[in-house]
Image (cartoon, grey):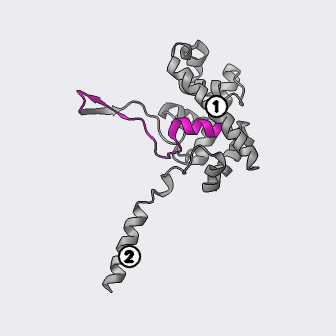
Amino acid sequence: MSRTVTAMVAMLILASCGGGYKAPPRNLDDACSIIAQRPEYERAFRKTQRRWGVPTHVQMATIYQESRYRADARTPFQFVLGVIPMGRQSSAYGYSQALDGTWDHYLKETRKRRAKRDDIRDATDFMGWYMTKSYEKNGIALTDARNQYLAYHEGHTGYARGSHQSKSWLLRVADQVQARADMYQQQLATCGRF
């Protein structure tokens, strides 16, 4: 009897270390591996691509940059005097790192009252909605991962004003997003998924 109890306790401990559904997939540098590990991601990407026209590889590269595929990703805490927590840097949360205000606008406009930022289907739909707005307001092609990311980061008005032009670090990050989108696009073509 004690062996059975010990074995059950050991299994519970091991199961708790598994990371659960919020753990990101392994090998984030391989788009085919990501969708093989998480079929629900592929369904979400396809649905968003059909509804909004944003290609899967653009969605995937943006999610990688924003959250590294962590459902519960948040910005770090800010500290005063190095020890007193003063809250998070922003309200960004989830796969898409949507801010509270932008997320609320999305919920109101799409009438998706039950959508959650830590649900991949809702996060990709939000990104499709936002990137479609970037196309409508700023003329950014849905296939242009670099400029879509810049508008995603700076907001539609900030992008239109050119606020990103003075941020060399952000321009480098946007170049990395484009490079990752190109890599994911090639990989998805080789595994015959998109």
Position in image of residue 53 (x %, y %): 74, 36
In this picture, residue 169 sits left or right of residue 193 = left
Residue 187, above or below 37: above
In this picture, residue 107 sits left or right of residue 135 = left
Q: Which residue is mark 2?
A: 8
Element marked by disc 1: helix
Does the magenta-highlighted stretch encompass residue 32? no
Position in image of residue 163 (x %, y %): 54, 15
| Most foreground residue, 27 or 23 | 27
Q: Estimate how packed mark 2 is, as few (under 14), some (14 to 19) or many (20 or more) residues with alpha carbons within 10 Å.
A: few
- State how far apart marks 2 and 1 are (Cα): 47 Å
Name the residue at 59% across, 29% down: 176
Q: Which residue is mark 1?
A: 179
Q: What span is in magenta?
A: 58-83
Q: Dots 2 and 1: beta carbons under 8 Å? A: no
Position in image of residue 55 (x %, y %): 71, 38
| Most foreground residue, 34 or 21 | 34
Position in image of residue 94 (x %, y %): 50, 42
Question: Is the C terminus in the top left, top right, bottom left or bottom right quadrant?
Answer: top right
Q: Which mark is residue 119?
A: none
User: Taking the image as drawn, is residue 128 in sight?
Assistant: no
Q: Estimate how packed mark 1 is, as few (under 14), some (14 to 19) or many (20 or more) residues with alpha carbons within 10 Å.
A: some
Name the residue at 68% across, 51% down: 43
User: Taking the image as drawn, is residue 116 in sight?
Assistant: yes
Name the residue at 61% across, 37% down: 61
Question: Is the N terminus in the top left, top right, bottom left or bottom right quadrant?
Answer: bottom left
For the residue marked with disc 1, what is the amino acid?
Answer: Ala
Element marked by disc 2: helix
Name the residue at 71% across, 45% down: 188
For the residue marked with disc 2, what is the amino acid?
Answer: Met
